[in-house]
Image: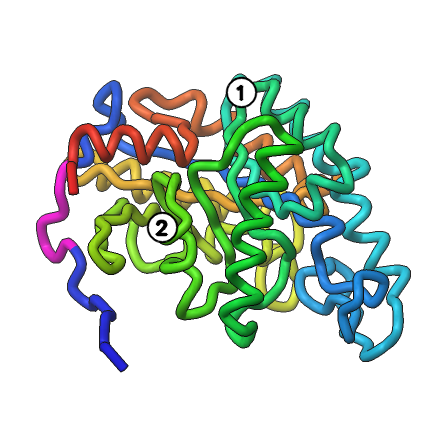
């Protein structure tokens, strides 16, 4: 097995990203749209979903979990629309990380985001853990995750974020071609190039830390204020460092989590804060990728 891990990165002197407008921080907001793509006995999975279901219900082998199913439905039915209205109010563009099956089950929501100018990113065919999936099955899921989103939303995705990739995921996407970047990495605060076979491929790091997946009173955020405070603290450190070394802040949301009225208040406070500051670039993954390709060629 080839050791392709990089512990050094940019080191002590990271490059100047030269963000548009001389921005000190690029803020990339991502909304996960997954309802209908999660593990479900109704869809032939052996268990119900047990990850990020908001209510702590466990996976149940061979049994449906109606309450878990309803949590994922909430994001698609209610939370996504609430967030779309908020982004419209602030005039910010985000990445909709769309699972293809979720988009298929609520195409109206997927199309509404595209019509508002947001970027649609492939979040896979299903919201599953691909680490143990056979390569030939994952290859077909990669194909479907591109084809279905293009058909439903009318736009072929140029970025992807699997979230739980296998060691083959990146290679399978690169083999299919047509992508500008992927998000399956948590290891930096700037984009960077890697080689996948003979292809130079761009990584735009994501975050499981500046992420509403930590809405859990036992290990993360209990209230919208907690969320806002943590995200603003992160932004302020990056903004201060950005006087010398501008960086990227990736913010991750879920329609079934931050889309709830008692939690969206934290996102409102964060957006109020960053939109009042100068030299902040709120951008999509595609905008970052196109900028990096112009300024920092492979």
- Expressed as whole percent of the image width and height from the top left, the position of residue 167 reads 40, 70
Q: Residue at x 26, y 22 (%)?
A: 20
Earlier along the polypeptide chain: callout 2 or callout 1? 1
Residue at disc 1, secondary structure = loop
Quadrant of the image occupied by residue 75: top right
The answer to whether 259 appears left or right of 231 in the picture is right
The answer to whether any part of residue 81 appears in the image is no
Query: Which portion, as a residue range, is magenta?
Result: 10-16
Residue under label 1, please give it. Answer: 117
Q: Residue furthest bottom?
A: 1
Query: Callout 2 environment at 10 Å: few (<14), some (14 to 19), or many (20+)?
Result: many
Query: Vertically, is 231 above or below 87?
Result: below
Quadrant of the image occupied by residue 42: bottom right
Nearer to us of marks 2 and 1 is 1
Q: Residue at x 39, y 48 (%)?
A: 182
Query: Callout 1 environment at 10 Å: few (<14), some (14 to 19), or many (20+)?
Result: some
Query: Vertically, is 259 above or below 145?
Result: above
**Which image quarter is the C terminus in?**
top left
Residue under label 2, please give it. Answer: 205
**Which image quarter is the N terminus in?**
bottom left
| Separation of residues labelled 2 and 1 (CA atoms) | 22 Å
The answer to whether any part of residue 198 appears in the image is yes
- Expressed as whole percent of the image width and height from the top left, the position of residue 83 reads 66, 31
Magenta segment's dominant SS is loop
Q: Residue at x 32, y 59 (%)?
A: 187
Q: Nearer the viewer, residue 169 or 271?
A: 169
Q: Residue at x 65, y 44 (%)?
A: 33
């Amino acid at each position: 097995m080839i050791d392709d891990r990089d512990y050094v990165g940019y080191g002590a002197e990271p490059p100047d990203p030269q963000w548009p407008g001389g921005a000190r921080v690029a803020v990339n907001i991502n909304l996960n749209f997954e309802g209908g793509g999660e593990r479900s006995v109704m869809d032939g999975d052996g268990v119900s979903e047990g990850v990020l279901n908001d209510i702590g219900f466990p996976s149940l082998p061979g049994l449906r979990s109606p309450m878990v199913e309803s949590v994922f439905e909430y994001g698609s039915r209610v939370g996504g629309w609430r967030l779309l209205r908020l982004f419209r109010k602030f005039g910010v563009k985000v990445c909709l990380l769309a699972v293809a099956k979720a988009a298929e089950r609520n195409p109206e929501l997927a199309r509404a985001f595209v019509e508002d100018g947001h970027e649609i990113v492939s979040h896979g065919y299903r919201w599953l853990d691909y680490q143990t999936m056979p390569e030939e099955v994952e290859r077909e899921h990669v194909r479907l995750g591109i084809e279905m989103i293009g058909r439903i939303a009318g736009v072929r995705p140029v970025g992807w974020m699997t979230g739980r990739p296998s060691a083959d995921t990146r290679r399978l996407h690169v083999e299919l071609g047509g992508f500008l970047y992927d998000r399956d990495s948590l290891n930096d605060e700037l984009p960077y190039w890697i080689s996948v076979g003979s292809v130079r491929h761009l990584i735009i790091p994501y975050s499981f830390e500046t992420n509403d997946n930590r809405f859990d009173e036992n290990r993360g955020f209990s209230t919208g204020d907690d969320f806002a405070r943590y995200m603003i603290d992160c932004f302020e450190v990056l903004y201060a460092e950005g006087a010398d070394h501008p960086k990227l802040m990736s913010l991750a949301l879920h329609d079934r989590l931050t889309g709830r009225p008692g939690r969206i208040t934290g996102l409102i406070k964060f957006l109020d804060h960053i939109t009042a500051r100068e030299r902040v670039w709120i951008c999509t993954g595609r905008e970052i990728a196109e900028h990096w390709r112009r300024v920092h060629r492979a």
